[in-house]
């Protein structure tokens, strides 16, 4: 999680960056905003993207003009990602006309666009994605002088000669213009970046600066700094850090960045002599400083001859990038000589390209390659005319992100060449030249690489896609372009129970603002059919879960060829994974987090399943820390969200539960009879009696008294119970790190943040009581008058108040022996209060909604958190940052989503072709910010062996016949297994330790399941599944597969 010094550090880094830029020649500021409109960020639309980039980066983007030249599929993907990101303008350039081959990868085009200019044909549909971006087109030849209108230029289909000319102009321009050249040639892709002679990276990775809480600092040379073991330190040797709040050794509080070494999980040394400094007493925060980094790019002409290190993606292909560097140059020569691409399957054209590659290699002298892989060059030449959709999606994400870096200085650029191939996606059996011939269809580009047989398989595929949000929109577009399920025999089923919200529109590009409130799956499926009218898709609004197994039944699962997850939570992923294992179906899994993405292939019998490995659970702050001893803003926001829900949702809901059914509510409270029931009753009584509101003035009084209670009285009580000099039972200071000693706040109507908190809290309180809000409430002067009328009683701390300090405590309620008696009194009191309420009175609980900036929810939560932060001298946050943390917003951008789906669809070719070995498949982790691409073959499933048998998670044992429990035990005994426990669902059918269970041995397993587990096997199902726990003859547990009894 993000830690407490983030805001202070952001200010320090920003100052450092401003200083760096001020010292440079202003003409060299490579991401200066163009003059014009002052960018206004629509936070509701861009909230997920803001969580990745921050405001400053977004403002720089809003001032950037970008050229995309070459509107093939790759150009379309790049333009889409930039328009969604929200640059100032995107200018499309293309001199070619649309042909059928373009329909394999450019989703803006349809058959009626054939013959039109490619750039002009894309303008209108691109504009629909974001009306705030200016979209225009240029046709005809481009001059280098025209490039001076842009901060970044991207070329997807340009000769090397022309690229060298344009890049030279951009490199030497003042300020430099970022130049990016990227190509997709069948299953091969390349990117080259040149951001000028000196490019300043303001934030190399986009991660929050790491922090630590100091426990001790030695007077030494070098000094040893130890931190509290609350959380492991994330520092690395060579990092720069600053100190603050150090008591005793105050010399370190000077704000000067210091270099660290010997970084350990809870300590590090400073390259500094502290022997003459003051002795460390207590306190101290250490925070990483992220200095800007200057990169010196080589121009294309020089970099082509001396490419330096290539960015790797797959370490099983270490020798591949130098070969592809040659191959792309050879293809450029081929096209220059013959004015066309090599023909798919032509051995003559392949030979010509190989000759060009050999010739270029021979000219390299000492740096030439010893051997050229002719087979790879054959694949490269044969498919080179095709721009495949999955490759375009992947590279569209990569290049789109590079443009964002060029325009903003956020994240580390790709330096400078990246080559990638996915030849493993080709069918296992060699393709005959006849299979690669065009058929005058929209799939001709894909057929030229994979052949007509696989194309037919794709069209007849039966696919289940779960989710149609950000990943789902990208997948639907990809599947439509690939021709997946685009025949009468094929079928794509997509399900999502969610509806479209405004914040979806910055990534989920199949949706428009007029779709807000409509079902995601229906709108996305309709949009995908507009891309390819032959797509055979059914859109459902069911959540895939145990409750919908009547919809997604056995016959449905058995009919599938593959399952694609487009989910955003682990629980749903685990469920789908379990169904895929059960029905032996391939699962293509992916996920994103900001600029990071990952893909995982789950292939029956070849790979482990998704559930075989799990991330460790996120560390939760102890309850006592959140309630009484916060030491970062996350703790304050967790507490704020909890208080919001307690006051405005849970208590009004409890009140309504009582008012709807007083006798039933009383009975439930008596039955529970515990501290929790007592607390609930007390809260409802307080809400309906002492804190009941009839007018807005009552609500303002309530809010003002809550402020006093939370931010003054409770702090006074805490510091009375534990004074600043308090000691623990072991003699250590009570208020030692990470605890921070709090100070009570004094309310003032002249403090806008305090007055705003009162206003927001009063408005929401009024909402729960159905009280209308008069216009005067939003007038600060009149609100201040109303607040000043509130009489605030004096507070005296009490002796003997118990405050929980145990970090393992899970509840703040203390049980009492007389809970039952107290509950009886409280019920009587509540029944008496209900008689004083107006007839039919009900409260209106408020459910927290983070994505509506006008509803005051985030104003209350940010106010709660910041007032508490002020108590504890923790840096405060603005409402947007508070929304990210309290709203648990998952950072998301279009580029990483596009890349993930492209990678998955490259794997889908393999799944649907069949016959591939595990070493052909790839799992990927990528971080576009660094950038890092890490691909590896999936892990095989764990094999369990017993005697001469072996099985994995993919195996299931089947028994035919309506057998008894005894017959089942004997069947297992024949395999050398002693069954001691048999269960069905959550019910135990048999356990050898229970004597009464022996009476069941001669009953049919199905009958025992019906009687004990209440399992009725539906008519369409022929079998019953049971889980059996077994031991071998040496009493060792043996984990056996699921057992299915086919009794019908």
Image: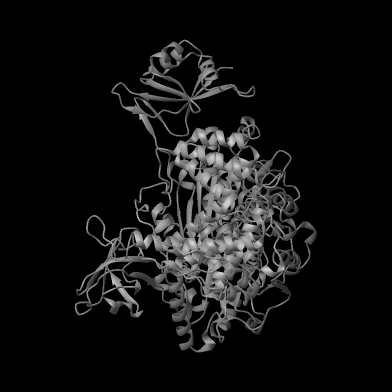
> Residue drawn at (38%, 32%), measured in percent from left and top?
944
Q: Nearer the viewer, residue 980 or 1020?
A: 980
Q: Residue 449: percent from the left, percent from the top?
A: 61, 53
Q: Is residue 127 visible?
A: yes
Q: Nearer the viewer, residue 183 or 22?
A: 22
Residue 979, horizontal then vertical, whole percent: 39, 20
Residue 363 horizontal side relative to residue 438, left or right: left
Relative image position of residue 945 (x, y in whole percent): 36, 30
Depth check, front residue: 651 or 158: 651
Q: Position of residue 891 (x, y in %)?
A: 54, 60
Which residue lies most toward the right here?
Answer: 112
Residue 131 in the figure: left or right of residue 720? right
Q: Can you tell which quarter of the image residue 464 is in? A: top right
Quarter-wise, where is residue 635 in the image?
bottom left
Q: How many marks?
A: 0
Q: Is residue 14 above or below residue 467?
A: below
Quarter of the figure with the C terminus = top right
* Residue name at image x 61 percent, y 33 percent: 549
Q: Residue 125 versus residue 186: which sits nearer the camera?
A: 125
- 174 versus 450 height, above or below: below
Residue at (26, 57) in percent of width and height: 728
Instruction: Tell me: 627 left or right of 167.
Output: left
Q: Quadrant of residue 107?
A: bottom right
- Residue 430 visible in the current orientation: no
Q: Quadrant of the N terminus?
A: bottom left
């Amino acid at each position: 999680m993000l830690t407490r010094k983030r805001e202070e550090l952001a200010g320090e880094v920003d100052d450092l960056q401003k200083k760096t830029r001020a010292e440079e020649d202003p003409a060299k500021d490579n991401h200066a905003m163009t003059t014009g409109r002052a960018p206004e960020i629509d936070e509701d639309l861009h909230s997920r993207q803001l969580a990745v980039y921050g405001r400053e980066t977004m403002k720089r983007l809003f001032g950037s003009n970008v050229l995309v030249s070459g509107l093939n599929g790759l150009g379309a993907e790049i333009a889409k990602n930039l328009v969604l990101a929200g640059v100032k303008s995107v200018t499309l350039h293309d001199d070619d006309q649309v042909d059928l081959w373009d329909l394999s990868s450019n989703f803006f085009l349809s058959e009626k666009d054939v013959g039109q200019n490619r750039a002009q044909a894309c303008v209108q549909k691109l504009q629909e994605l974001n009306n705030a971006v200016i979209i225009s087109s240029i046709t005809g030849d481009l001059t280098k002088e025209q490039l001076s209108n842009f901060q970044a230029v991207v070329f997807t289909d340009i000769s090397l000669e022309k690229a060298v000319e344009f890049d030279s102009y951009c490199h030497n321009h003042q300020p430099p213009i970022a130049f990016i050249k990227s190509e997709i040639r069948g299953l091969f892709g390349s990117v080259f970046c040149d951001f000028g002679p000196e490019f300043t990276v303001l934030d190399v990775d986009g991660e929050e600066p790491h922090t630590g809480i100091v426990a001790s600092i030695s007077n030494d040379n070098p000094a040893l700094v130890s931190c509290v073991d609350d959380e492991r330190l994330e520092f690395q040797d060579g990092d720069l850090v600053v100190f603050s709040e150090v008591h005793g050794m105050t010399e370190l509080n000077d704000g000067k960045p210091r270099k660290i070494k010997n970084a350990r999980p809870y300590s590090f040394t400073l390259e500094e002599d502290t022997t003459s400094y003051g002795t460390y007493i207590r306190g101290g925060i250490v925070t990483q400083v992220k200095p800007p980094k200057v990169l010196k790019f080589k121009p294309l002409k020089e970099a082509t001859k001396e490419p330096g290190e290539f960015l790797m993606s797959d370490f099983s292909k270490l020798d591949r990038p130098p070969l592809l560097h040659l191959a792309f140059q050879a293809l450029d020569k081929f096209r220059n000589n013959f004015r066309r691409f090599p023909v798919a399957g032509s051995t003559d054209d392949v030979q010509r390209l190989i000759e060009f590659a050999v010739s270029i290699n021979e000219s390299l002298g000492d740096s030439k390659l010893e051997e050229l892989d002719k087979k790879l060059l054959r694949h490269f030449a044969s498919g080179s005319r095709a721009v495949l959709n999955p490759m375009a999606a992947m590279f569209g994400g990569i290049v789109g992100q590079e443009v964002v870096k060029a325009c903003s200085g956020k994240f580390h650029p790709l330096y400078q060449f990246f080559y990638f191939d996915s030849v493993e996606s080709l069918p296992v059996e060699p393709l005959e030249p006849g299979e690669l011939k065009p058929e005058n269809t929209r799939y001709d580009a894909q057929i030229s690489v994979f052949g007509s047989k696989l194309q037919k398989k794709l069209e007849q595929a039966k696919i289940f896609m779960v989710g149609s949000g950000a990943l789902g929109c990208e997948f639907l577009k990809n599947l439509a372009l690939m021709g997946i399920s685009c025949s009468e025999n094929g079928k794509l089923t997509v399900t999502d129970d969610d509806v479209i919200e405004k914040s979806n529109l910055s990534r989920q590009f199949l949706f428009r603002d007029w779709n807000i409130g409509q079902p995601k799956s229906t709108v996305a499926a309709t949009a995908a059919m507009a891309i390819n009218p032959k797509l055979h898709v059914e859109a459902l609004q069911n959540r895939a879960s145990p409750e919908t197994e009547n919809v997604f039944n056995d016959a449905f699962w058995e009919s599938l060829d593959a399952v694609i997850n487009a989910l955003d939570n682990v629980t749903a992923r685990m469920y789908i994974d379990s169904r895929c294992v059960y029905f032996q179906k391939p699962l293509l899994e992916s996920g994103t987090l900001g600029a990071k993405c990952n893909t995982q292939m789950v292939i029956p019998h070849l790979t482990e399943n998704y559930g075989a490995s799990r991330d460790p659970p996120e560390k939760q702050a102890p309850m006592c820390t959140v309630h009484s001893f916060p030491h970062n803003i996350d703790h304050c926001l967790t507490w704020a969200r909890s208080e919001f829900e307690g006051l405005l949702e849970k208590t009004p809901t409890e009140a309504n539960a009582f008012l709807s059914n007083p006798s039933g509510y009383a009975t439930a409270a008596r039955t529970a009879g515990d501290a929790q029931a007592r607390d609930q009753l007390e809260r409802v009584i307080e809400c309906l009696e002492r804190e009941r509101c009839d007018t807005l003035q009552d609500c303002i009084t309530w809010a003002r008294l809550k402020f006093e209670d939370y931010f003054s009285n409770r702090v006074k009580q805490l510091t009375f119970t534990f004074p600043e000099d308090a000691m623990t039972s072991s003699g250590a200071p009570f208020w030692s790190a990470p605890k921070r000693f709090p100070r009570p706040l004094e309310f003032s109507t002249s403090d806008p943040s305090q007055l705003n908190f009162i206003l927001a809290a009063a408005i929401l309180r009024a909402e729960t009581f159905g009280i209308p809000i008069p216009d005067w409430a939003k007038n600060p002067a009149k609100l201040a008058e109303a607040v000043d009328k509130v009489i605030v009683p004096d507070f005296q701390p009490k002796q003997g108040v118990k405050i929980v300090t145990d970090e393992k405590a899970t509840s703040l309620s203390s049980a009492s022996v007389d809970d039952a008696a107290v509950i009886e009194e409280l019920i009587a009191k509540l029944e008496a209060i209900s008689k004083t309420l107006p007839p039919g009175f009900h409260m209106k609980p408020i459910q927290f909604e983070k994505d509506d900036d006008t509803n005051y929810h985030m104003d209350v939560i940010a106010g709660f958190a910041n007032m508490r932060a002020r108590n504890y001298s923790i840096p405060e946050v603005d409402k947007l940052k508070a929304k990210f943390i309290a709203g648990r917003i998952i950072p998301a951008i279009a580029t990483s989503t596009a890349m993930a789906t492209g990678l998955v669809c490259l794997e889908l070719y393999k799944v649907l072709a069949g016959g591939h070995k595990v070493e052909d498949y790839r799992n990927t982790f990528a971080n576009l910010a660094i950038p890092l691409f890490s691909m590896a073959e999936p892990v095989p499933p764990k094999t369990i062996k017993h005697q001469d048998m072996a099985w994995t998670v993919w195996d299931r044992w089947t028994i035919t016949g309506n057998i008894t429990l005894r017959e089942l035990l004997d069947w297992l005994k024949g395999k050398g297994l002693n069954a001691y426990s048999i269960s069905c669902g959550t019910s135990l059918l048999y356990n050898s330790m229970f004597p009464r269970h022996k009476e069941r041995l001669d009953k049919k397993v199905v009958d025992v399941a019906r009687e004990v587990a209440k399992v009725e096997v539906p008519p369409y199902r022929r079998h019953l599944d049971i889980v059996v726990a077994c031991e071998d003859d040496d009493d060792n547990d043996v984990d056996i597969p699921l057992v299915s009894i086919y009794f019908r």
